[in-house]
Amino acid sequence: MKKLIYMLALVGVFQYSYAQNHTFNMVKEGIYTMQFVSKHTKDTYRIDVQIPFGYQSNKNRYPVLYALDGNVSFGMVSDIAKLLYFEKQHSAVIIVGISYTTYQEWIHKRGRDLMPNTTSTKEIDRYHTFIKDELIPLINTNFRTQKDKNIIYGHSSAGVFGFYSMFKEPLVFKNYILTSPSVDEDGGYIKQMEKNFHIKNKNLDISLYTSMGNSEKPAYINNYTQFIKQLTNSNHSGLHHKTDIFEGTHMSTMAPAFVKGFEYMFRNKEK
């Protein structure tokens, strides 16, 4: 009997933990959060979700924008999206921020999860699988989403991850906002990935927005310019791509570049 009671207690703990891991809690008006343990990365992430104005009073479905580096990007992205809603009704979206549990965790683990290298892609593949097979289904289950209109936003190393996802499995996301992507720090991996993709696939049916600052380090400007030229010359069928150059540095152009990228995604309505 004692053994049975012990086993039932363990089952109860397991069920409680599972429920906690899969339950969103409202932390303030319009924003929900949860801690999610990925079976693929074995890490815990904080998932923040902002629903658009009017979500509770209608039955509409919305595009979802997934913001990488949520520890430092979710606030900016969610606030900008809310403000633009007042001017552009079609820019109503669900915002999902993907964060690590602490700022120190973010500093320590983002390079592992976001940046591919020539030695191994094991870690970035696990992170990609977490987003594709765990996070996106979780959001689709808990919120009214337009499943075929996912948007990914990434800046710097997170922009490189966006390219990695784009050339690995293009239709996980339909729209890409990749600002100041650090293509100078990946050892040429993304350039080669694009070449390999183009050999096997002539079609890339997505919308892509990219940008750089005119005061970024010279090595970055050179590598970014070369990559954008390579991408343009590949002439992928179905690709809608816009790139801008902003006055400023790697970080100071982050917000204005996101605004332009966000507007481009909704101006390009056929996507």
Image (tube, rainbow, N blue to C red):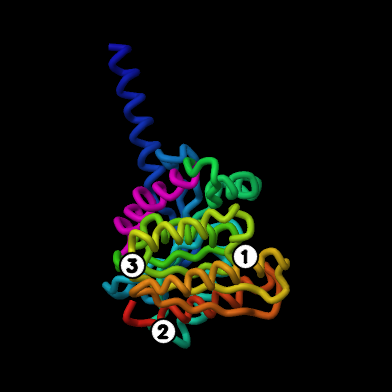
Question: Callout 3, which amino acid?
Answer: Lys
Asked whether 124 falls inside the magenta stretch, the response is: yes
Query: In the image, which disc is placed on residue 223?
Result: 1
In terms of secondary structure, where does tag 2 sit?
helix
Q: Is residue 220 visible?
A: yes
* Label 3 Cα crowd, 10 Å radius (few <14 / some 14-19 / many 20+): few
Which of the marked residues, 3 or 2, is nearer the chain's N terminus? 3
Above or below, comparing residue 158 to residue 6 in the picture: below
Above or below, comparing residue 220 to residue 192 in the picture: below
Which of the marked residues, 1 or 2, is nearer the chain's N terminus? 1
Residue 71 in the image: state x and y as whole percent: 58, 56
The residue singled out by tag 3 in the image is 202
Q: Residue at x 48, y 60 (%)?
A: 162
Question: Callout 2, which amino acid?
Answer: Arg
The residue singled out by tag 2 in the image is 267
Which of the marked residues, 3 or 1, is nearer the chain's N terminus? 3
Asked whether 242 falls inside the magenta stretch, the response is: no
Question: Callout 1, which amino acid?
Answer: Asn
Q: Main secondary structure of the magenta part?
A: helix
Q: Residue at x 50, y 76 (%)?
A: 261
Query: In the image, which disc is placed on residue 179?
Result: none
In terms of secondary structure, where does tag 3 sit?
loop
Q: Residue at x 30, y 23 (%)?
A: 8
* Label 1 Cα crowd, 10 Å radius (few <14 / some 14-19 / many 20+): some
- Which residues lie in the magenta part? 123-144
Count of numbered circles on the image: 3
User: In which image quadrant can residue 167 be found?
Assistant: bottom left
